Structure formats: C-alpha cells, structure tokens
Image (cartoon, rainbow, N blue to C red):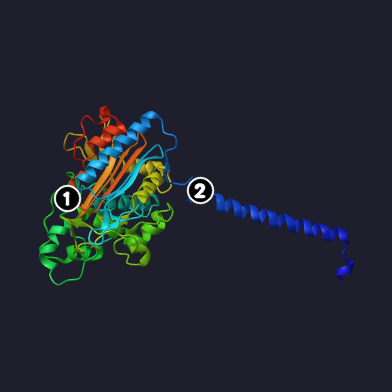
Amino acid sequence: MLKKVQPKVWWMAIAVLVILLISWGLVRKNKADSPDVAVSGKSVKNLDPVPVSNPDAETEEKIAKIQDIFRRKRNAGFNGNVLIVQKGKILYQNSFGFAHMKAKDTLTADSRFQLASLSKPFTAVAVLKLIQEGRVALDDSVQRFFPDFPYHGVKVDMLLSHRSGLPNYIYSFDDSVRHGRKYPDNLDIMDWYAKVVPTPTPYNRPGRSFNYCNTNYCVLAAIVEKVTGDSFGKYLNSQIFTPLGMQNTYLVTDTTIAATKNRTDGHQYGRRLDKDYYDDVVGDKGLYSTTLDIYRFYNGLTKGLILEKKMLDEAFKPRSFERDGIRNYGYGFRMHIKEDHTPRFIYHGGWWKGYNTMLWVCPEDDAVIIVLGNTYNRSTYDLRELLEVVHGSVKIDNIEKDI
C-alpha cells in the first residue's frame, strides 16, 4: 500500500512536518524569551524597576545624598530594607541590619516584613476589584453580607474611607473575650460584635467624619471572604499577587513553607516581640512582603492591570474635608492634596509590633519610596530630608517632618 504513494506526496508531507516543527520551536522560544506580564488580556513589560545605567551628574549627586541620609539613619538605629525608584529606574536599594536580632542573620532584598497598616491599600484594591466586577457596591450596607451586624447605616464606601464611626475592635473586643480564648480571626470579630451585650459604643455617626480605625478594614476583609467564598489570603493571591508576579507576599495566617520563607521578626528595644493576640485578624494588617513586591503592586495598579483607571482614580480621590489641611484619605490610600483637591503625594504607613513601614509616591515625578523596618524606629517615617532630594525642596515646603 505504501509503495503506491507517489514520491511527490511524500516530499510534501515531509515539508509540512518540518514547517510545523520550526513553527513550534519559534513559539516556544518566544514564550521563553518574553518578559511580558499578561493580566486579564492585557500585556505589559516586566513590572520590576531597572538599575540606573550611566547616570548623569545630577542623578549621581542625588544618589550620593540618598546614601548619606540612610547612612545616618542606620547610625540612628534603622534596621530594614529600602527601595527608591524614579521613572522606573532604581536610585537606591539597600538592606541594613538583621532579620532576627538574636540570630544576627543579615537582611537581604528577599527578606519579608510585616506591612502593618500598609496592608490596607491591598485590602482596598481587593474590595474595589469586586466593586468593578459588580459583586459589591459602594453603597452596600454591612448588613447585606452580615445581617446581624449591630451598627446600621455603615456602607462599604465608609469603611474604605474610614468614615464609618465604628469602634476599634482592638480596644472594644479585648475587655470581654480575650481571656482563655484562641486567637480570633475576622469572622470571630464579626460574630462577637453581633452577640456581645451591650454593643460597644460607636465613635461617631456613620458618614459624619473621618476617624482612622482598624475595624473598617477588618470588616472589609470579612466581606471579601463572604462574597468570594475564599479565604482572604487565597483571594489576594489569585486576584492580585499572582497576576502581578508578587511571589514574596503572603498573609500572616499562611503557615506553609513557601509563605514563611524569609520572614523577619519584629523587635522593640532590641527584643523580639511574640505573636500578638490580634495577629490573625487581617485586612487592617497581616501581610508580609518585600520592597520589590510592593513596587510591583503599585506599578501594576498604575498600568491598569488590576483596576480600571476610573476605579483607581476613585481610590486616589480625597474623601474627608471636615478639617482644613493638606492631609486626606481616599479608599485605602493616604494623600497630601493640592488646592484643587487632587493628590500631590500618595502614601500609607504602618506600625505593628516592632514593624515600621512606608510607601510614598509622587505621581508627578514618577517616584516611589518604600521603607520597611523590623525594629521600631521613628526614622522610618522621617522622610522630609529624603523627599527634598527626590522631589526638590519647593515641592515639600509645607510637609511635616514625620509623615
């Protein structure tokens, strides 16, 4: 039968096979060589910053000044990691001190720090993504998700902007149930508020004024779990961390080997701080991450990979004007605003059990400053001198020394 096949047909079959093999090889090569990151059908170049090559005299002077600032911070007790990026180029990146003071193990760029309240922007983005998808609405009340929640009139947008008036669970929860109980999680907090008698007194009426309160973001994380059916950590990982290539960011509640690798300890007065009773309550805190992953997060946001521009603009829009001044709060982001109420600087800091953290962004200068410390030290927040170098003294003439 095979002998009856014409030689011409054989050659054609072989040619087709060769073409297919070459095409397959080229596709594999392109996939292997491509540095692009694809998210929801969009493709962008790698989200990482790149080192400055052949800096001009002005940039060299700027780098030298930054180095001197952190040399003095280190002498003043700063222990942590730093990443400063402008226009996608790394101006400065360094690690100072130890991951664990007792072990004297040197910090590296891969060391993971508890972000404390710097976790709040991630929680806000998770909720805004659900809003973007139509699964949650800004004017939804908490009762839509937790019918027994005792505070009425509290809406999602109030939680995001710290305008709910809710009492802080860290203070109200403690008095009645702390003794002899397991570490509570977010759903435990929600259940306690629904059952405790008398109901803790709120700080204010919903929507009346800004009052920064961790309960807002504890409730938001619980809403994410209720809507998605996933744990908060699983949702963050699938919808934010994995798409943005954030391979070193995990919740404190994740105890897998991958999650606990390179974790630092928090210290105060030179001593390691043990697990806190409220460590398993997340959303308001609880993320461990690196300077580079935090940069990927912000860079991915501004490239529209997680939220559409319209939704991101809502996050960066100031929401509270009871008091005059440059400080304000959007949805999960602090900001210093201009006279037209647009943000000049966007930032968020954190403190929790020995950890100090700061993300500072100047959209106009395309500059990002990330400082993570694991030994309590106020110099983490003392940014004025650094900002003068990065932004110029004119832009920060009315910015407080301690942000």
Q: Which residue is mark 1?
A: 165
- Is residue 286 shown to the viewer in this render? no
Which quadrant of the structure image shows residue 173?
A: bottom left
- Can you tell which of label 1 and label 2 is closer to the viewer? 2
Query: Left of 211 or right of it: where is 387?
Result: right
Where residue 223 appears, as percent x and y from the top left, is 29, 58
Seen at 67% across and 53% down, the residue is 23
Where residue 384 appears, as percent x and y from the top left, is 23, 36
Relative vertical location of residue 129 with respect to residue 385 in this rendering, above or below: below
Q: Amino acid at mark 1?
A: Gly
Seen at 17% across and 56% down, the residue is 270
Relative depth, front residue between 210 and 183: 183
Q: Amino acid at mark 2?
A: Asp
First along the sequence among labels 1 and 2:
2
Relative depth, front residue between 85 and 6: 85
Query: Left of 36 or right of it: where is 379?
Result: left
Relative depth, front residue between 152 and 2: 2
Quarter of the figure with the N terminus: bottom right
Which quadrant of the structure image shows residue 386?
A: top left
Seen at 39% across and 45% down, the residue is 301
Dot 1 falls on a residue whose secondary structure is loop
Callout 2: few (<14), some (14-19), or many (20+) C-alpha neighbours within 10 Å? few
Q: Which mark is residue 314?
A: none
C-alpha separation, residue under disc 1 versus residue under disc 2: 44 Å
Q: Which mark is residue 36?
A: 2
Dot 2 falls on a residue whose secondary structure is loop
Which quadrant of the structure image shows residue 147?
A: bottom left
Relative vertical location of residue 212 with respect to residue 392 in this rendering, above or below: below
